[in-house]
Image (tube, rainbow, N blue to C red):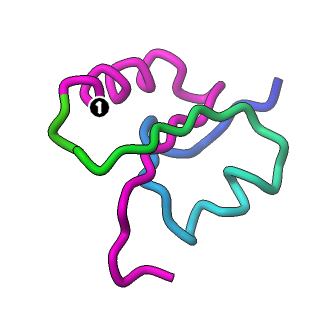
Amino acid sequence: MEVLSNPALIKFSKDYIDDIFGKGRKALILFTDDEDASYVQVFAETSKKFLGHILFIVCGDEEGEQ
């Protein structure tokens, strides 16, 4: 298994497109606009346990981003 070198929790952006979709890596994507929700904290803590093996991505409303 290839060990990943990305941060434990990735905030979706153009910078990570290739890492997320271009290399066939396992990934979990949480779609939310509420960054303060308790489940986001649980997601972030869980991402640390799987660091280097699964990508954990948070994707929300990115006004102004295209």
Residue at the image point whose x is 54% and y is 19% from the top = 50
Query: Residue 28: x, y in percent?
Result: 58, 32
Identify the residue at image location x=82%, y=23%.
1
Most foreground residue, 51 or 64: 64
The one of 36 and 1 positioned closer to us in this rendering: 36
Q: Nearer the viewer, residue 47 or 6?
A: 47
Relative to 44, does residue 19 appear above or below in the rendering? below
Q: State left or right for residue 46 relative to residue 22.
A: left
Q: Is residue 44 above or below residue 29?
A: above
Residue 10: in magenta span: no
Q: Position of residue 27 (x, y in %)?
A: 65, 34
Q: Which residue lies under the disc numbered 1?
A: 40
Q: Residue at x 52, y 35 (%)?
A: 56
Q: Residue at x 37, y 25 (%)?
A: 43
Question: Which amino acid, by three-letter code, is at mark 1?
Answer: Val
In which quarter of the view is residue 45 placed?
top left
> Is residue 46 magenta-colored?
yes
Position in image of residue 46 (x %, y %) = 41, 18
For residue 35, which quarter of the picture? top left
Does dot 1 land on a helix, a strand or a loop?
A: helix
- For the record, the magenta segment spans 38-66
When the figure is inspected, residue 49 is found, relative to residue 53, above or below; the finding is above
What count of labels does the image hold? 1
